[in-house]
């Protein structure tokens, strides 16, 4: 029985390797396969698909140190903006967006003032309004 299982495992590994040669990669969370196109998977040492990012980020972010978290937030926000239409929002309104319109949001350090809230001459950052952070809001994708 164990020999049969080992053979099945070898065969599966061969299939995974063949898929990789064809440019298809697997999300480490949901195990679905995706074309290896920019934007289909977020690469942070493990591959995460867009649909798994919210759950993955909420479970991982609390386990990271500040520096590591800030670095990963910057990469994630750039990926979300570049490939998934996420927007930088400097102010959140009293009424949250309708849940059908928003997939995911994170708060990241402002790239203009590097999270300080002030610019070189000590004036308040106009981009983040002196808070040092901005929201990255990713829209819900139509299925």
Image (cartoon, rainbow, N blue to C red):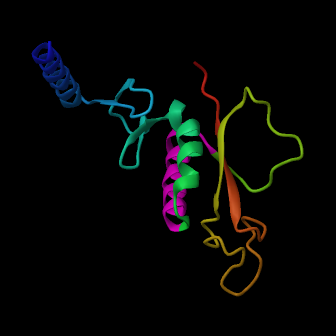
Queried whether the magenta region covers residue 105, the answer comes back as: no
Residue 95 screen position, x and y as percent? 88, 41
Q: Is residue 46 left or right of residue 109?
A: left
The residue located at (17%, 17%) in the rendering is 5
State which region is magenta.
67-86
Tell me if I can see residue 136 in this picture. Answer: yes
The secondary structure that most of the magenta stretch takes on is helix
- The relative height of residue 69 versus residue 131 in the rendered view (above or below) is above
Residue 60 screen position, x and y as percent? 53, 48
Queried whether the magenta region covers residue 72, the answer comes back as: yes
- The relative height of residue 35 versus residue 97 in the rendered view (above or below) is above
- The relative height of residue 68 versus residue 122 in the rendered view (above or below) is above
Residue located farthest toward the bottom when viewing the structure as drawn: 121
Q: Quadrant of the N terminus?
A: top left
Residue 56 screen position, x and y as percent? 52, 40
Res 101 → quadrant? top right
Res 130 → quadrant? bottom right
């Amino acid at each position: 029985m164990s020999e049969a299982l080992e053979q099945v495992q070898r065969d599966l590994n061969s299939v995974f390797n063949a898929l990789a040669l064809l440019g298809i990669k697997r999300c480490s969370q949901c195990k679905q396969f995706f074309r290896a196109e920019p934007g289909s998977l977020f690469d942070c040492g493990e591959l995460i698909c867009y649909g798994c990012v919210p759950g993955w980020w909420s479970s991982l972010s609390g386990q990271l140190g500040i520096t590591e978290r800030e670095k990963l937030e910057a990469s994630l926000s750039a990926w979300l903006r570049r490939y998934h239409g996420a927007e930088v929002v400097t102010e959140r309104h009293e009424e949250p967006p309708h849940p059908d319109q928003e997939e995911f949001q994170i708060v990241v350090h402002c790239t203009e003032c590097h999270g300080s809230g002030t610019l070189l001459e000590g004036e308040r950052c106009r981009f983040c309004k002196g808070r040092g952070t901005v929201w990255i809001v990713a829209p819900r994708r139509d299925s």
